[in-house]
Amino acid sequence: MRAKVAIDFVQKAKDSGAKHGAVMSVVVADVENRRGLFGAQFGAIEDAVGAMDGITSCNVRAPFFMDNMWGDVDSIKSQNTFYAPVDSDVKQLSVAVSDVGSALASAALNTSHGGKSYYVIGDYASKADIAALYSKKLGRKVTHTRASEEAATAAMKGFGFEQWQVDGILQLNTHNETSEWLSQYAGDFQKLTGKSPITLSQYLDMALIPAISPNEFVKPVVVVQNCGNAGLAAIKALLAKGGCMVRTASRNPDKLKATKLEGLDVEVFKTGDDALFKGIDRFVCIAP
C-alpha cells in the first residue's frame, strides 16, 4: 500500500506535466543491498519512479530520525535511562527531520540531481555514545537499557504505530552500516544542500536537553549592536535558529518595536543603557 500510494502520486504528477522531482527513501532501499520490509517498500518506489519515461528524479535516502528520540524524554526524566531494542555498542545512522526536508527541497529544485541517489546522514553513534552525551550535558549519569522486542512493540503501538510499521522498525535495528560505508557517503548531505547536517550533540542541545531539564537549561542571551539592514537580518536569523534570547538597542525603542521589529520577540533597550549588556552570553558586532 505504501509503495502504491507513492507511485500513483508520482504518476499523477508526471501526467500533469511535472518533469523532475525528489523521492523520499531509506538507506536500506539501495538495490545492491536492499534489506527488510522498508527496503522493499521504498525500493519498489525508487524502481518504479526511476523507470518512468519523461521525468527525472532524485532519491533522498534517510536512516533513523533523531526526532524519534523525543520518545525517550519521559524515561530519562524519571529513571535516567532510555530504552531501545538494540545492544548499547551497536553504531547506527541518524538524521534530523529538518535536514531531510532541506535535502528533499534541494533535490526537487535542482534538476542536475536527476538520476542520482543521496544518503542524508547527520551522525553515526551507538546508544552508549548517546547516553554519554546525555550524561555530559545533564550533569548526571544517563544509561541505555536494552528493551525486548515485545516491550518495544508495546511501546510503539502505544504511540499509534501499526504492526507492519513496528516490524519494519525492528528490522531496521538489525540492518546497520559499517564505518567504511559511512566514509563513502558521509558527505552526501553537503553535496546536495551545500551545508553541514545537524549532529546528535547539536540536536540534543536544541531540542531534547531543554525538554528534559528545562530548569537547568538557560537560553543564551545574544546582543546585536544595532538594527540596521545587517543587524535586522542577524536578528531574524537568530530567532529562526531558536534556542536564544535576542537584544538590541535604539535611540527610540518604542518606534523600533512598532516598525522593523513588530511581531518579533526581541528585547530593545535605549542606546547607552548599560542594562543592555547585563547577563549576555554572545554578541554580534555591527559598526554603524
Image (spheres, grey):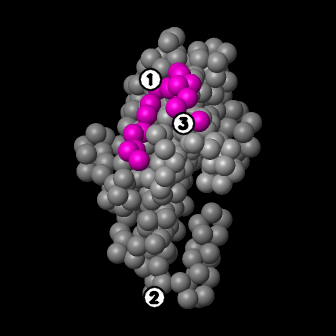
At which x and y percent is residue 275? 56, 25
At which x and y percent is residue 17? 55, 88
Identify the amino acid type marked 2.
Gly
**Which of 17/278 is in front?**
278
| Alpha carbon separation for disc pair 3 and 1 | 41 Å
**Dot 2: what SS?**
loop
At which x and y percent is residue 47? 45, 71
Q: Residue at x 49, y 52 (%)?
A: 228
Query: What residue is shown with label 1?
Result: 133
**Which of 200/146 is in front?**
200
Q: Residue at x 47, y 48 (%)?
A: 231
Given this view, does label 3 or label 1 mark the residue nearer the observer?
A: 3
| Alpha carbon separation for disc pair 1 and 2 | 48 Å
Q: Is residue 70 visible?
A: yes
Sequence-wise, the earlier of marks 1 and 2 is: 2
Q: Residue at x 44, y 65 (%)?
A: 106
Given this view, does label 2 or label 3 mark the residue nearer the observer?
A: 3
**Which of 152/72 is in front?**
72
Cβ–Cβ below 8 Å for labels 2 and 3?
Answer: no
Query: What residue is shown with label 2?
Result: 54
At which x and y percent is residue 256? 63, 48
Above-or-below relation of 190 to 282: below
